[in-house]
Amino acid sequence: MEFLRPRTWQEALAAKAEHPSAVPIAGGTDVMVEINFDHCRPTHLMDLGRVPELHEWEVGSATVRLGASVPYTKIIERLAPELPGLALASHTVGSPQIRNRGSVGGNLGAASPAGDAHPALLAAGAEVEAESVRGARRIPVEDFYTGVKRNALADDELIKYIHIARADGPQQFSKVGTRNAMVIAVCAFSLALHPARRTVRTGIGSAAPTPLRARAAEDFLTVALEEGGHWDSGRPLPPSAARRFAELCAAACDPIDDVRGSAAYRRRAVGVMARRTLGWTWESYRGEERSTRCA
Amino acid sequence: MRVTFTVNGRRHEADDVWEGESLLYVLRERLGLPGSKNACEQGECGSCTVRLDGEPVCACLVAAGQAEGRDVVTVEGLAGYEAARAGTAPREVGTVQQAFLDAGAVQCGFCTPGLVVAADELIERNPAPSDADIREALSGNLCRCTGYEKILDAVRLAAGRAAAPEEVS
């Protein structure tokens, strides 16, 4: 095994082009487990810890440009106002020790269906900026996941930034597990209201081969909110509409039975989380609307 | 490969380090610092918690080469680390360690090094932690003797003593 230590992004890209099988390592919270347990013996291990851009973020007018290696702790502490869904999801990752090292870039690189960041990225709206010596491209996050632990990256590409839409309304994240800390999701769900565009977006984790959006549920809720005049009135949705939204979210799942839970349980739990997160986000939206109107 | 880094204020060089080796292995097997414990090797248990450039991390999940040029504090250096930041003379055991002894928070002792490193970092960051703060800060450290109540007592005791150091005999 060879240990590569690029000091710049250009050096990292050159090294990845020269050694396409090199495994990038940032926080190590996934890669080192694989190595410790002898599940993976890469020819080259490439430490991205010294590439400055990957540890930085920039808050723009519409999006946050998040360096791939920015640890979850920083997202929780510094980016919660702009990325509330992702900050909530980040807070459920592992433990303080893991959150100090793990990053969204690592979650995307591993592309586990159970990665905690994925539902929040899907709900907020995000693009993955991948780069190689051939050039850079932006991949919408919903197209990034291509299979169980598979993603759209080419062999010579590295994840540089994640461009995430700044929240324009309430966002929520919910996760089912056996306890609060150190738990891999049985299933997870994220919901983002987008009042500026009068749409909603969802993200489902650990209930299909890849993280995914419940598009039929999003479309249903978008129409229901619009037709009922809810964005303007702030009135809560009728329970029947909330129930229908939850059913459509559950129907979007394609789960399996495994040691963490059964397919039937996952489908049911996603429906429950969809209904609850809808209630929480809508209450929050109503609260904001009220304070805006009173101001 | 050779890895050079600072451990507990002293520069160390480790030679013939395998590229896939963890920081934990280098500390225990190459530098003779067995205080950080090796248990799960997957970041679940927190027994190997050390400070890496000040941040609590699982040493089992840091590749040795990633520690190049960095600053590491292990449980062996915790009392000195505390004294250095407080500007006091070093004692043999630090405030958190003494509180663990006094509160009976040590049973088999295997989880203790990781817990005291994590608890010391909490008190440095947050001198008056609530019970919820303590639980969250220690949520990555497992005690299989399940002595958590005494551990919580010890952290509360240590925080109180750190806030009023003159009361420590």
Image: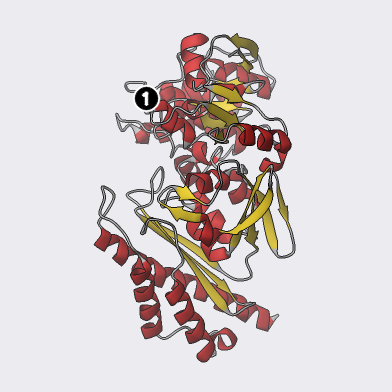
Q: Quadrant of residue A197?
A: bottom right
Q: Quadrant of residue A10?
A: top right
Residue A244: image location, x then y, percent: 37, 80
Residue B157 located left or right of residue B106: right
Q: Which residue is mark 1?
A: B39
Residue A28 located left or right of residue A129: left
Q: Is residue B158 visible?
A: no
Q: How many marks on residues?
A: 1
Question: Residue at left 42%, top 30%?
Answer: A40
| Residue sitting nearer the eye, A39 or A258 | A39
Q: Amino acid at mark 1?
A: Ala
**Does A8 appear above or below A138?**
above
Residue A152 located left or right of residue B5: left
Residue B54: image location, x then y, percent: 62, 29
Screen quadrant of the C terminus of chain A? bottom right
**Does A101 appear above or below B88?**
below
Q: Chain of mark 1?
A: B
| Residue sitting nearer the eye, B134 or A18 | A18
